[in-house]
Image (cartoon, grey):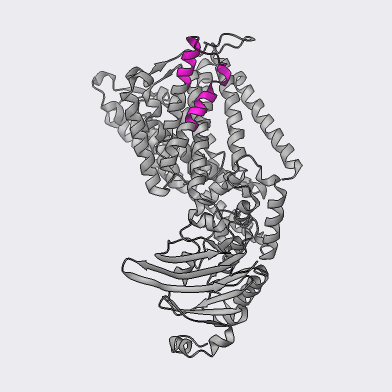
Amino acid sequence: MTGPALQLSDVRKSFGRTSIINGVNLAISRGERHAIIGPNGAGKSTLFNLISGRFPVSAGRIDLHGEDITGLEPHLINRKGLSRSFQITNIFPRLSVYENLRCAVLWSLGYKYSFWHRIGALREVRGRTDAIVERIGMAARRDRPAGVLTYAEQRALEIGVTIAGGADVILLDEPTAGMSRSETDEAVELIRNVTEGKTLVMVEHDMSVVFNLADRISVLVYGEVIASGTPQEIRGNKTVQEAYLGTEQL
Amino acid sequence: MTPVVTKRRIIFWAVAALFFASLPFVFTQSFALSMLSQMGIAIIFALSYNMLLGQTGLLSFGHAVYFGLGAFFCAHALNLVGAGKFWFPVTFMPLVGGLAGMFFGLVLGFVTTRRAGTPFAMISLGIAEMVAASALMFTGFFGGEGGIATDRTVGGTMMGIGYGPQIQVYYLIAGWCLACIIGMFAITQTPLGRMANAVRDNPERAKFIGYNPTRVRWLMMTLAGFFAGVSGGLAAINYEIVTAETLGVMASGNAVLMAFIGGIGHFWGPIIGAVLVTLLQSALSNYTQAWLLYFGLFFLVIIMFSPGGIANLIMLHKAAWEAGRLKRLLPGYSLSGGAGLVMLLGFFALIEMIYRSEAKDAANKAFSYFGVTLDPVQATFWIGTLAVLAAGIAMFYAATRVVKRAWDDITAELQIKGMV
């Protein structure tokens, strides 16, 4: 197949009179790992909320695999193969790790709202869930309620829930925020591992993570993409350096 | 699940069936039999309510709507059979109630489940009031103040079963009760059942794993409506009369009480609640006119000291039991049990004295209390009662500290062993 996995065309968003996203154009190819960086308040999370359908766009168009998804409800976008994580951990706190992941694989395996299948007897569901428990390294924690996990474990579960449905476009919103150095390294390995062969878009503040993972980087400042390119190009970009001056070291 | 578990589960349900079947041999009085019948109806109702509250996180104040409508439809269906309009076995008549409850769950749920949380609670209350008001307006269907009377024996007698004697009605209710418990438990083990828990925990996140939380709530509401309708249908058969009260806010409140007292966090919690509430409501009212006060206080105590209900209290002991540490709690429990009895004895006496002193004719104020005649006109009885109460409170307080110390020891030990 050709064409970008995800394409944003002149996407705009304003809350009342405040304009947050001012005409973003972005094309992300299949299999690409794309990072979106930018100073606080640039609109990175808002952009994710627009792409994933959490907020409606004010103007513009979003295509997923060449199909218009603008204005669709989040669950419909998810069913078309786009899955996202959240900056603030957003899991099912009273369900166990295993249940969290199992819920996340159900739709993609076609069980929908079934109340006639016994969930424990569904071989594929069990297999897929077990595989993800292993993959995010939570085998020892599988029966604990998600709400009592450590922060880093919850972040890993958040990624697990995001990838469990097998979506091929993954949006990760600050996956390493609030982690220690060693936790971050582990998270990077996990992300690299679970997004193998998928399209990844991530918002990230930690520049080492960005330069470590991303194939391409877009810089968002005041709701506009001021630069887009390979890590090398972005590092050498004058406008980017100005935008970041005094805030973060590239 | 491995087949072993399934086999174990079949044995479990078989034992439950035997238990239900043997109850009338243990409790032979007619009073007990009608109470057991009531309990069966209440169990289905409370469990169906917990499909919303405990499993989907929907605090409904109008669940009796589906119970009541199920009861009315079932009563009308019975009357139609009686009039020879069509034939349908009485044994399966609760199904009519179930389908009616399901239909209204589907229709009303479409409106109510668009929202969760407080808005849902308020909308459910509004709908309950609306339906209750309609019941008094449309007297043709609801029978006005008098309600709709019916006759459960319209099906005639087949193989000796005509539902004339209460014992046969009990077995009808017990059979449906068991079937509904199995059905509702089975639903918790399905994709929808699990997603209901997910939507309860975090509806927003459910959207981003492909599920529409509104749809999940709506389906759960429809299914809960079915089971509530079945219990309503059984109520119509049991009482042979259905009044507007059955779908009123009071009846809905009962569902809330049963679920909370039993415990909403465990599937079987509401069963305990239903049994206990039915017991208290019929037994307590035989002994004292102040029973509503005691009932209300009981509810308060449960909510304040064990928000997870009785089921949660039981589950707290499970870890200790598995570690073989339960007997360490015995001294504390027997002490506080004894002290609690003294405290309650004083407390009930005080309430009854206050209650009796309000009586109109002074001659009748004295009353018998556990074999002792208490007379609220004489000060000595007041002093005595207060003394018993104060002693009870002091002893109970001391005893709870013994319990607490034992619990702390056990918890610490289990933590060391990594069992908690």
- Where, by quadrant of the figure, is residue B412 drawn? bottom right
Residue A163 x, y percent position in the rendering: 62, 62
Looking at the picture, tell me which residue is in the foreground, B335 or A107. Answer: A107
Point out the residue furthest to the front here. Answer: A2
Residue under the point 54% across and 11% down: B164
**Location of the N terminus of chain A (image quadrant):** bottom right
Please, what is the dominant secondary structure of the magenta stretch? helix
Tell me if I can see residue B275 in this picture.
no
Residue under the point 57% across and 11% down: B162
Residue under the point 53% across and 36% down: B223
Residue B75 x, y percent position in the rendering: 46, 19
Whether residue B359 is situated above or below residue A120 in the rendered picture: above
Residue A48 x, y percent position in the rendering: 49, 67
| Magenta residues, start to end | B74-102
Q: In the rendered structure, does residue B99 fall within the stretch colored magenta?
A: yes
Looking at the picture, tell me which residue is in the foreground, B72 or B173. Answer: B72
Whether residue A26 is situated above or below residue A126 in the rendered picture: below
Q: In the rendered structure, does residue B60 fall within the stretch colored magenta?
A: no
Looking at the picture, tell me which residue is in the foreground, B129 or B329. Answer: B129
Residue B314 x, y percent position in the rendering: 57, 43
Looking at the picture, tell me which residue is in the foreground, B389 or B312. Answer: B312
